[in-house]
C-alpha cells in the first residue's frame, strides 16, 4: 500500500511537471496474467513478456532476425544438438514492495524458467491450479530438449534430442522469457506463489507497477536496464476492447497509439492531421484449403482449375479494401526463403472451364466454409466466400457457403472426410518458414489434432521440410524451402488468398515506434513530443 | 412482517436451484470448448485435448460435473477462472463495484427523469409534451444500446469534446482502490480534480445504460397515473378543493407508485443485460464486460458462477422491491 501511495504521488507529480513522459497505449484486451509462460494471447505478451521480461535470444526490433538477449553469445556443436549459451553479466532484476534481489541474473534463472514448464514434477509446474504451458508444448520443446546443464553461473548448455534449425528463434518467443528463481524462492517461503503471476519481476525495459483488472496496466521505466533503456518514463495500457472507441480515444488524445483499427476507418485516420499511420506487410496468410482426400479435389488439376476461376484481386479490393497483398505462396513475402520466382495461377475462367472439362468434372457442387469471426488475416470471410461463389458459378461450379460458431468451426474443419473447402489463415509465431509450412502443410500435421486442413500429404514436400529443419546453413535451408514452395504451387492444396497489411495508428507526437512483423507491440523505443 | 419475509425467502430456494441448472447448462450448450478455443488455428492433438479436459475435470459425465459444481458451491467455492486461474468470487468482487456504481447512477437518472416525465405527461394528457415524450420513450425503448453508445461518444466526446471517451477516470490520476467506487475513492484520494474527472467519465455510460429503463419507467408512470387519476378518491380530493400539487403528489402519485416500483425493480435485470453492452463500449471494467469475455472464451467456471451471482443479485433486489410494497401499501403486508 505504501508503495502504491508513493507511486501515486510520484505519478501525480509527473502529471503536473510536464518533464516526465507518460505514454498511453489503448490495448485491445485484458492480459490473462503476467507470467509469460502459461498464456497464449498476443495481447497478454504485449503486457507481460515484452515490457517486463527478456529471453536468451531476442528478435531484433522490427524484424524476425534473432539477436543476443540475456545470452551474449552461443556455440553450437558440429551435429547441431548442443547449444552452449554464454550469459550476460550484471543484469539486474526488478524489485517491488516484497522483493529486493540480492543477486544478478544467472544460470539458475535460465534452468528454473525452462524446467518449471517442462518437468511435470517440478514444484513450480502447477504453482497455480490448472496452469498449463501451451506454447512450450506446441513448439514441441518437451520432445526436443534432452537436458539443460549449468556449466557455471554464466554458462548454460542445452542438449537437444535432434538438431533443430529454428531453435534459436523458438527461444526468442515470449513463452521462453526468463523469470527470477530468487523471486520464486522468496514467494515460496512467504506462501504467496501466485504472485509470480500477479506481481511480476523481470529484467525487461519496464517495471510492473499495478494492474486494475480490465481497466489499466501501469509500468515505469527500468532505470537499471542492461540494454538501451526506454525513453519514456511511464507506460500505461488503457484497455479498450472496441476498435471504434479506441479510435475516438486516440483522436481525443486520451491515448497515443492503438492496435487493430477497423479496416473501414483507415481512410479517416489518413485524413486526420493529428494522426499518422504506420503500415507493414503482415507475417500472415489467408487461404482456402480444399479437402485433398475427397474426389474430385484429390486431383491437383481440378484444384488448379478452381484456383484459376477465382478473381483474387477482386477479393483484395473488395474485402481487404486494398490493405493486403495477393498471395501466391503459403508464406508471406517478408519471410526469408519466400520464392518470388513462382508465378501465380492466372485468373482465367475460360481456361479453368476447359481444364475442368478435360478432367471430366461437370456440374460440380461444393461447399465453402467461411469463418464467423474477423481474424488478422481475413477481415470478412463471408464476403470473400460470396465473391468466390460468384466467380465459381461462372465456370459451372455451384457453391454453398457454410459457417459455424468459431470453436465449432475450428473443430469441424479438422474432421476427416470433411465436406467442402475451408477458409482459414495463420499468423507467424517466430518468423521461421517451418512455423508456416510444417504446421499447416506437412504430412505430420494432416492427422487429427494437426492444423493441415487440406489433409494434404505430399511425401516429397514433407521430406524437404524435414531436411530443412535439421540443416543449420541458412542458404541451404532457403534452397529447400524454395523448392517446397514450387511443389506447393504445382499441387495447389490451397487457394492462397492474401497477406493482409497491418496498420498502427498513432498520434503525430509519437516517434520511434517500430512495427513488429510478428505483431508485437513494444514501447522501449518510442518517444513523445510535447 | 417477519413471516412475510420468511415466506418470500423460502420461495427463493427452488428458484435458486433452478438457476444453478440453467447457469451450468447454458455455457455447455454452446458449441466449442475452452481447450479448442485456446488452441485456435493451431489445433490440438486428441491426446493433449483429453489430457487438458481431464485436468479441468471436463471428462466426467455432465451430471457428475453438475453435482460437483453444486457441492463446491455449497461450501462457498465457485471455482477458478480457466483463463486467469483466479477464484471467480475474487474477480467478481473486484469488478462488482464498478457495475454497481454505473447501475446506481443509471437507475437514479432513469427514475428521476422517468417519473417526472411520466407524471407530467399524465397531467397534460394529449398535449404536445405528452405526445413528444411518449414517442421519444418508444424510440428509447427500442434503442440498440451498442449503436447508441457509439453515437453519443462520437458526438459528445469526438465532436464537442465535452466528455471523455471511455474509462473510469483520467489516467493521470492514480490511487489505490479503497472501496472500488471511483466517485468515493477519488474523493478519498484528495487529489485535485480527481472527483470531477471520475464524474465526467460516468456521465455518458450511465446515460446510455439509463435509456431503456427510463423509457419504460416514463411509460409505466404515465399509465399508472392516468388510471389512478380516474379513481373516486382523487375526484373527492379535488372536489373538496385540495390544491393540485397535493392531489397529484400525495393521493395520486403514492398509489400510482406501486406498479412503478415493480417496474423499477424489474429494470434491475434489464440493467444487468444493458451493462454487458454499455461496459464493453465504454471500456468500463465491470462484470458485464467480464461475462462477455468469459462467454467468448468458454470460461465455464466464470460464466456459471457469474450468472449465478448476477441472478442472486436480481433476486435480492426483487425481494427488496416486494418488501417496499409493504411500505407503500400496507394492505399487501396482510396478504
Image (cartoon, rainbow, N blue to C red):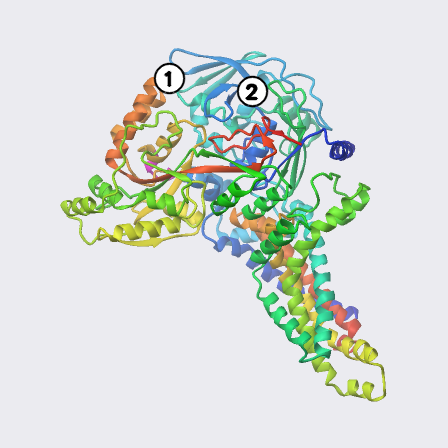
Place of residue B29 in the rendered image (x, y in percent of width and height, measured from the top left): 48, 55
Quadrant of the snapshot with the N terminus of chain A: top right
Q: Reply above or below: A218 against B266.
A: above
Place of residue B9 in the rendered image (x, y in percent of width and height, measured from the top left): 71, 65
Q: Tell me which segment is drawn in magenta.
A: A445-450
Q: Which residue is mark 1?
A: A472
> Looking at the image, is mark 2 or mark 1 nearer the viewer?
1
Label 1: which secondary element: loop
Q: Reply above or below: A151 against B2.
A: above
Q: Which residue is mark 2?
A: A110
Mark 2 residue crowding within 10 angstroms, few (<14) / some (14–19) / many (20+): many
Q: Which secondary structure is most common in the magenta stretch?
A: loop
Residue A253, quarter of the rendered image: top right
Residue A249 in view of the camera: yes
Q: Is residue A137 left or right of residue B287?
A: left
Mark 1 residue crowding within 10 angstroms, few (<14) / some (14–19) / many (20+): some
Question: Mark 2 or mark 1: which comes first in sequence?
Answer: 2
Query: For the residues marked 2 and 1, what is the alpha-carbon distance in whole angstroms?
Result: 24 Å
Q: Is residue B238 left or right of residue B212?
A: right
Place of residue B181 in the rendered image (x, y in percent of width and height, measured from the top left): 74, 49
Q: Which mark is residue B173?
A: none
Label 2: which secondary element: helix
Task: Depth check: give the residue in front, B82 or A441.
Answer: A441
Name the residue: 29% across, 44% down: A291
Protein chain holding label 1: A
Place of residue B284 in the rendered image (x, y in percent of width and height, measured from the top left): 64, 49
Amino acid at each position: 500500500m505504501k508503495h502504491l501511495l508513493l507511486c501515486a504521488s510520484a505519478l501525480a507529480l509527473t502529471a503536473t511537471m510536464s518533464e516526465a513522459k507518460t505514454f498511453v497505449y489503448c490495448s485491445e484486451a485484458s492480459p490473462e496474467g503476467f507470467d509469460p509462460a502459461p498464456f497464449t494471447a498476443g495481447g497478454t505478451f504485449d503486457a507481460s513478456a515484452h515490457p517486463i521480461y527478456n529471453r536468451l535470444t531476442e528478435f531484433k526490433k522490427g524484424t524476425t532476425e534473432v539477436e543476443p538477449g540475456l545470452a551474449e553469445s552461443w556455440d553450437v556443436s558440429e551435429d547441431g544438438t548442443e547449444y552452449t549459451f554464454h550469459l550476460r553479466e550484471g543484469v539486474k532484476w526488478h524489485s517491488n514492495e516484497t522483493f529486493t534481489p540480492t543477486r544478478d541474473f544467472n544460470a539458475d534463472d535460465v534452468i528454473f524458467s525452462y524446467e518449471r514448464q517442462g518437468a511435470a514434477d517440478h514444484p513450480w509446474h502447477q504453482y497455480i491450479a490448472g496452469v498449463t504451458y501451451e506454447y512450450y508444448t506446441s513448439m514441441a520443446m518437451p520432445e526436443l530438449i534432452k537436458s539443460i546443464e549449468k556449466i557455471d553461473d554464466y554458462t548454460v548448455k542445452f542438449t537437444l534430442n535432434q538438431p533443430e534449425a529454428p531453435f534459436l528463434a523458438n527461444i526468442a518467443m515470449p513463452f521462453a522469457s526468463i523469470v527470477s528463481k530468487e523471486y520464486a524462492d522468496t514467494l515460496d517461503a512467504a506462501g504467496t506463489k501466485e504472485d509470480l503471476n500477479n506481481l511480476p519481476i523481470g529484467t525487461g525495459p519496464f517495471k510492473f507497477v499495478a494492474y486494475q483488472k480490465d481497466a489499466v496496466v501501469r509500468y515505469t521505466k527500468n532505470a537499471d536496464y542492461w540494454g538501451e533503456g526506454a525513453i519514456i518514463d511511464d507506460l500505461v495500457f488503457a484497455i479498450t476492447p472496441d476498435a471504434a472507441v479506441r479510435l475516438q480515444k486516440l483522436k481525443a488524445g486520451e491515448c497515443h497509439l492503438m492496435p487493430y483499427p477497423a479496416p473501414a476507418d483507415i481512410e479517416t485516420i489518413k485524413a486526420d492531421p493529428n494522426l499518422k499511420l504506420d503500415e507493414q506487410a503482415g507475417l500472415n496468410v489467408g487461404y482456402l484449403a480444399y479437402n485433398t482426400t475427397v474426389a474430385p479435389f484429390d486431383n491437383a488439376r481440378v484444384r488448379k482449375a478452381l484456383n484459376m476461376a477465382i478473381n483474387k484481386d477482386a477479393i483484395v479490393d473488395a474485402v481487404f479494401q486494398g490493405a493486403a497483398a495477393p498471395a501466391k505462396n503459403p508464406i508471406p513475402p517478408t519471410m526469408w526463403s519466400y520464392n518470388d520466382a513462382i508465378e501465380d495461377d492466372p485468373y482465367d475462367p475460360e481456361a479453368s472451364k476447359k481444364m475442368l472439362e478435360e478432367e471430366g468434372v461437370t456440374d460440380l457442387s461444393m461447399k465453402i466454409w467461411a469463418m464467423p469471426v474477423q481474424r488478422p488475416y481475413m477481415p470478412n470471410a463471408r464476403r470473400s466466400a460470396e465473391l468466390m461463389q460468384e466467380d465459381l458459378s461462372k465456370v459451372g461450379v455451384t457453391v454453398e457457403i457454410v459457417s459455424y460458431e468459431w470453436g465449432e468451426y475450428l473443430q469441424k474443419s479438422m474432421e476427416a472426410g470433411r465436406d467442402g473447402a475451408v477458409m482459414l489463415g495463420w499468423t507467424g509465431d517466430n518468423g521461421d518458414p517451418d512455423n508456416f509450412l510444417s504446421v499447416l502443410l506437412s504430412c505430420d500435421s494432416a492427422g487429427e489434432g494437426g492444423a493441415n486442413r487440406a489433409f494434404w500429404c505430399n511425401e516429397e514436400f514433407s521430406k524437404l521440410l524435414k531436411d530443412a529443419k535439421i540443416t543449420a546453413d541458412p542458404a541451404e535451408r532457403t534452397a529447400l524451402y524454395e523448392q517446397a514452395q514450387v511443389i506447393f504451387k504445382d499441387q495447389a492444396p490451397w487457394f492462397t488468398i492474401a497477406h493482409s497489411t497491418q496498420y498502427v495508428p498513432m498520434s503525430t507526437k509519437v516517434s520511434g515506434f517500430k512495427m513488429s512483423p510478428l505483431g508485437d507491440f513494444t514501447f522501449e523505443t518510442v518517444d513523445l513530443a510535447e | 412482517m417477519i413471516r412475510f419475509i420468511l415466506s418470500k425467502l423460502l420461495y427463493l430456494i427452488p428458484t435458486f436451484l433452478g438457476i444453478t441448472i440453467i447457469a451450468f447448462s447454458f455455457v455447455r450448450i454452446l458449441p466449442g470448448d475452452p481447450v479448442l478455443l485456446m488452441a485456435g488455428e493451431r489445433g490440438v492433438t486428441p491426446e493433449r485435448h483429453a489430457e487438458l479436459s481431464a485436468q479441468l475435470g471436463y471428462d466426467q459425465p455432465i451430471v457428475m460435473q453438475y453435482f460437483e459444481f453444486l457441492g463446491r458451491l455449497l461450501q462457498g467455492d465457485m471455482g477458478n477462472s480457466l483463463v486467469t486461474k483466479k477464484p471467480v468470487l475474487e474477480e467478481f468482487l473486484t469488478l462488482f463495484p464498478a457495475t454497481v456504481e454505473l447501475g446506481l447512477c443509471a437507475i437514479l437518472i432513469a427514475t428521476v427523469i422517468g417519473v417526472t416525465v411520466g407524471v407530467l405527461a399524465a397531467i397534460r394528457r394529449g398535449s404536445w409534451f405528452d405526445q413528444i415524450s411518449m414517442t421519444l420513450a418508444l424510440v428509447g425503448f427500442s434503442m440498440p444500446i451498442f449503436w447508441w453508445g457509439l453515437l453519443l461518444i462520437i458526438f459528445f466526446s469526438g465532436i464537442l469534446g465535452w466528455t471523455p471517451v471511455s474509462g473510469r477516470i483520467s489516467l493521470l490520476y492514480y490511487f489505490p482502490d479503497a472501496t472500488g467506487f471511483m466517485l468515493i475513492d477519488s474523493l478519498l484520494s484528495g487529489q485535485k480534480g480527481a472527483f470531477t474527472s471520475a464524474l465526467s467519465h460516468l456521465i455518458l455510460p450511465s446515460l446510455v445504460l439509463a435509456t431503456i429503463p427510463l423509457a419504460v419507467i416514463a411509460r409505466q408512470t404515465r399509465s399508472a397515473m392516468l388510471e389512478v387519476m380516474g379513481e373516486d378518491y382523487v375526484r373527492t380530493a379535488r372536489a373538496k378543493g385540495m390544491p393540485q400539487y397535493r392531489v397529484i403528489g400525495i393521493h395520486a402519485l403514492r398509489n400510482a407508485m406501486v406498479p412503478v416500483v415493480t417496474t423499477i425493480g424489474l429494470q434491475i435485470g434489464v440493467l444487468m443485460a444493458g451493462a454487458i453492452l454499455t461496459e464493453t463500449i465504454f471500456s468500463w471494467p465491470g462484470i458485464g464486460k467480464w461475462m462477455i469475455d468469459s462467454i467468448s472464451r468458454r470460461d465455464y467456471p466464470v460464466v456459471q458462477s457469474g450468472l449465478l451471482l448476477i441472478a442472486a443479485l436480481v433476486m435480492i433486489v426483487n425481494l427488496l422491491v416486494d418488501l417496499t410494497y409493504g411500505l407503500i401499501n400496507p394492505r399487501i403486508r396482510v396478504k
